[in-house]
Amino acid sequence: MSASRSDRRHAARFVLERRLAPHIDENWAESLLLELRLLGVGGDQIGAALSEVDSHCVESGEGADEAFGDPVAYARSLPLPVADDASPRALLASLGPTAVQLAGMFAMTWSTDSWLAGTPFEVTVGHLVCGLLALASGGILIGFADPILRALITRPRRGGVLLGTWFVAFTATNVAALLLLDASAGSVSAGWLLVLGAVSVTAGTAWALARLRAGSGSGDPITSPVGAEQAAPTRMERLLASRVVAVGAVPFAAVVLFALSVGLHAAGVS
């Protein structure tokens, strides 16, 4: 049973490569497809590039590796138009809505208890350190976006473990900073900070929804140039294109944490 399950996973992984380039090595085709997508090449251009490689290999009898060499290097050598801006500025813009949401969620979470108690919110050194860690993490994600995406797509289990480990370490570091670096750096109105946080979460969500409606970062489907049939989305395309869940994740967490704090306060726990 385990063998058949493994075969099914293998077949599902390469369904797009088999459809567009059935005569070349599946791993080579996947690497070419992935690199072109990460470079921001449009789906129709990617389909045409794969089909061209496949046709050449059929006519020449050569393997893709023999005829074109390393798939990543070959992908980068192709003079194809870039449909999506993959520059650091574009990556920063794509992360902007989530960053605004997270900033608002943290502001709401930190200020709720003080607001419920009717006291100002004390900004500690730990809070400032958490902000700096968040900025540093965003910079790392932007700087290493390509290898992170490759790890998540080509080795989802290993990439998921590494990403989960980073998240646990990031959370633990923030908690330690809040607990240990409790020296006051000033105080602000808890009510106003709570309102500012709610506005930030709302604004970030509206920004993210606007980008989705405009099709920004949605990833056009990869299609064959020899037929109108559209290839089914692969695991890679689903990972790169699906952002609907991510748009609502932070607002949902912010509301849950706020409700939990109110509930605990009402119960006399906090």
Image (cartoon, helix red, strand yellow):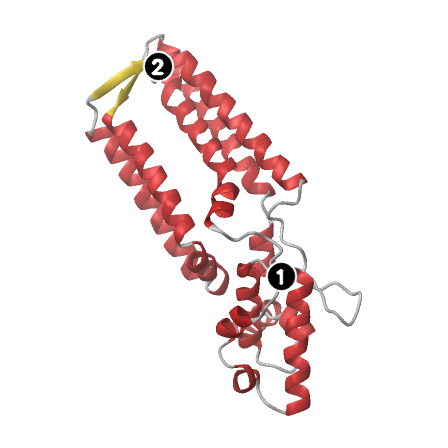
Looking at the picture, does residue 112 appear above or below residue 173?
A: above
Q: Amino acid at mark 1?
A: Pro
Residue identifier under label 1:
81
Secondary element under disc 1, as helix, strand or loop, is loop
In the current view of this chain or complex, which residue is farthest to the right?
A: 228
Which of the two discs, 1 and 2, labels the residue nearer the N terminus?
1
Tell me if residue 222 can be seen: no
241 or 92, nearer to the observer: 92
Report x, y in % for residue 200.
Answer: 49, 25
Quarter occupied by residue 213: top right
x, y (%) of residue 151? 44, 61
Outermost residue, front side: 79
Q: Determine the image quadrant of residue 4.
A: bottom right
Which x, y percent locates residue 183?
Answer: 19, 22
Residue 269: where, in percent of width, then height? 34, 18
Give above or below for 2 relative to 184.
below
Q: Which mark is residue 247?
A: none
Residue lying at 42% horizontally and 12% vertically, measured from the top left: 191
Q: Is 161 placed left or right of 241 in the picture?
A: left
Q: Which residue occupies 36% across, 23% down?
A: 110
- At x 35% / y 14%, what residue is drawn? 114
Q: Nearer the viewer, residue 229 or 94?
A: 94
Q: Is residue 209 left or right of residue 116?
A: right
| Residues packed near mark 2 inside 10 Å, few (<14), some (14 to 19) or many (20 plus) | some
Q: Is residue 152 left or right of residue 49?
A: left
Q: Amino acid at mark 2?
A: Ser
Q: Is residue 74 visible?
A: yes
Picture quarter with the C terminus: top left
Q: Which residue is mark 2?
A: 114
Q: CA distance from mark 1 to mark 2?
A: 53 Å
The nearer-to-camera label among 1 and 2 is: 1
